[in-house]
Image (tube, helix red, strand yellow):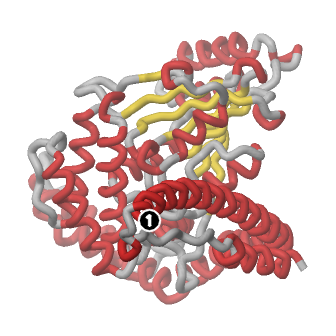
């Protein structure tokens, strides 16, 4: 955040002084001041941490990439990593990336967990190529049986295991046995942030990274804002999901952006539904607490003269006063229960039949339904922008695909030319020996327009979306 205003320069000292006075006051010594201290730390903190949370493939990383205008974070379909990504501000000449890898013990723990969830045979040594190949084949079989890597929780876990093993094999030299190894951008011979981000964004690499710290130049980060991208709240590895929940509730976090994703059938994912259910349960519990407060106090007419309740109260009081010890109170326990029953039964009946039902309806009308309307309106307001952005993105991706296909086609043509040249030399030798039946055929050049036809179709579709 920016520097504190002049009147707030001594905020910490002022708050500490007030808390000291509170602690010195005997009647206030038991007060919990933790929340006050947490709020003060946030107010004077030089950083403003913004956490992006949501289900996997909800678009958290894509949203951050769009905000910063740079492809920093892994944003492909499906869960690929339990990595926490932190993005902070840096001057253009100081842009860098710091990579922290999982230890071999942590990788092994994740492999064992996924094997247990998938019902695969656990391997004792993940450094054996045969064991890795066996687990990969088992995971691929599960994905095939489920109909795709994103079709079910089991398929997602199988895909996560494949990516994790692939990343471990590819980065084995960077992973230490017990400790988390940290590397700078220079140690990987990356010349700029783009090269480092391209490495970190690759799914297999991202799977074995524990933490990625980006330091990049962008006006959004200039005011000491720190963006944190977390694993999905429904990550295949439970430990990764727990990391997200802990980060959301961390006292140093200043704001949380929750990115929701509608599932294929129009429903929310399981973890997102649980988050919404927690909010509804909290509202209902608060309403129930208010209702239960009435049970503690006696009814206003409970002690009116001429009522059975006052008669029962006097009889019970007389019974409990027969002796000087507690024996008479123990013997009067049935009478005390009967007295409480006379007061509680009408209250509970009134709550069930009338009061609580009205309270619940009021909670829905005043708290939950307006919140849902606000959320839906906010989403609908972004529809036109999202459609326009989708059109531009598709056009850009299609154009890049065309260029990539052209590059691959040129590379193939170059290889064909070299091959044909060698074949011509061999055929010349065979012709000189009059072995015409053994002449080798040459390869004709590829057709670029055929290779790029799919990409051109994407361009047409993107332009149609923009229109």
| Residue 97 shown left or right of residue 162 in the figure | right
Quadrant in which the C terminus is drawn: bottom right
Is residue 215 at all visible to an observer of this figure? yes
Q: Position of residue 235 (x, y in %)?
A: 41, 57
| Residue 85 shown left or right of residue 114 in the figure | right
Q: Position of residue 167 (x, y in %)?
A: 36, 45
Quadrant in which the N terminus is drawn: top right
Judge by depth and name the residue closer to the eye, 459 or 290: 459
- Residue under label 1: 431
Judge by depth and name the residue closer to the eye, 413 or 224: 413
Q: Quadrant of residue 267?
A: bottom right
Is residue 28 at all visible to an observer of this figure? no
Disc 1 element: helix
Q: Quadrant of residue 337?
A: bottom left
Q: Position of residue 256 (x, y in %)?
A: 63, 48
Residue 59 lies, with reference to residue 26, above or below; the image says below
Q: Residues within 10 Å of mark 1 (few under 14, many from 20)?
A: some
State the residue at coordinates (14%, 43%).
128
Residue found farthest to the bottom = 353
| Residue 299 shown left or right of residue 229 in the figure | left
State the residue at coordinates (65%, 52%).
257
State the residue at coordinates (49%, 20%).
187
Q: How many marks?
A: 1
Residue 227 lies, with reference to residue 157, above or below; the image says above
State the residue at coordinates (71%, 65%).
402
Judge by depth and name the residue closer to the eye, 154 or 6: 154
Q: Position of residue 374 (x, y in %)?
A: 76, 70
């Amino acid at each position: 955040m920016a520097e504190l205003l002049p009147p707030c320069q001594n905020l910490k000292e002022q708050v500490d002084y007030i808390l000291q006075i509170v602690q010195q006051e005997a009647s206030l010594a038991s007060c919990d001041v933790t929340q006050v201290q947490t709020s003060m730390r946030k107010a004077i903190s030089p950083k403003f941490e913004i956490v992006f949370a949501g289900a996997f493939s909800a678009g958290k990383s894509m949203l951050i990439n769009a905000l910063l205008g740079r492809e920093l974070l892994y944003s492909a379909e499906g869960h690929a990593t339990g990595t926490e990504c932190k993005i902070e501000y840096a001057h253009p000449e100081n842009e860098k990336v710091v990579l922290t890898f999982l230890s071999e013990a942590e990788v092994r723990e994740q492999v064992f967990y996924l094997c247990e969830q998938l019902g695969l045979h656990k391997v004792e040594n993940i450094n054996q190529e045969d064991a890795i190949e066996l687990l990969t084949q088992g995971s691929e079989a599960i994905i095939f049986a489920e109909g795709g890597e994103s079709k079910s929780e089991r398929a997602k876990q199988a895909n996560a295991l494949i990516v994790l093993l692939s990343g471990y094999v590819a980065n084995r030299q960077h992973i230490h046995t017990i400790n988390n190894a940290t590397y700078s951008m220079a140690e990987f011979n990356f010349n700029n942030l783009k090269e480092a981000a391209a490495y970190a964004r690759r799914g297999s690499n991202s799977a074995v990274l524990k933490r990625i710290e980006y330091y990049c130049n962008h006006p959004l980060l200039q005011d000491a804002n720190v963006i944190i991208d977390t694993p999905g709240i429904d990550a295949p590895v439970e430990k990764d999901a727990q990391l997200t929940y802990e980060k959301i509730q961390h006292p140093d976090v200043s704001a949380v952006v929750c990115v929701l994703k509608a599932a294929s059938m129009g429903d929310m994912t399981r973890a997102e539904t649980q988050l919404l259910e927690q909010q509804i349960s909290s509202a209902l519990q608060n309403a129930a607490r208010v209702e239960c407060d009435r049970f503690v106090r006696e009814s206003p007419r409970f002690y009116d003269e001429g009522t059975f309740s006052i008669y029962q109260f006097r009889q019970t009081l007389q019974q409990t006063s027969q002796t000087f010890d507690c024996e008479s109170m123990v013997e009067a326990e049935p009478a005390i229960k009967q007295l409480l029953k006379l007061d509680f039964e009408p209250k509970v009946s009134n709550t069930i039949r009338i009061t609580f039902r009205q309270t619940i309806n009021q909670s829905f009308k005043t708290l939950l339904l307006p919140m849902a309307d606000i959320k839906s309106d906010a989403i609908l307001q972004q529809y036109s922008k999202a459609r326009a952005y989708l059109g531009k993105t598709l056009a850009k991706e299609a154009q890049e695909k065309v260029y990539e296909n052209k590059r691959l086609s040129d590379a193939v043509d170059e290889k064909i030319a070299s091959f044909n040249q060698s074949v011509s030399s061999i055929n010349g030798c065979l012709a000189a020996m009059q072995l015409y039946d053994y002449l080798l055929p040459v390869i004709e050049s590829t057709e670029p327009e055929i290779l790029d036809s799919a990409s051109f179709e994407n361009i047409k579709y993107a332009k149609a979306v923009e229109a």
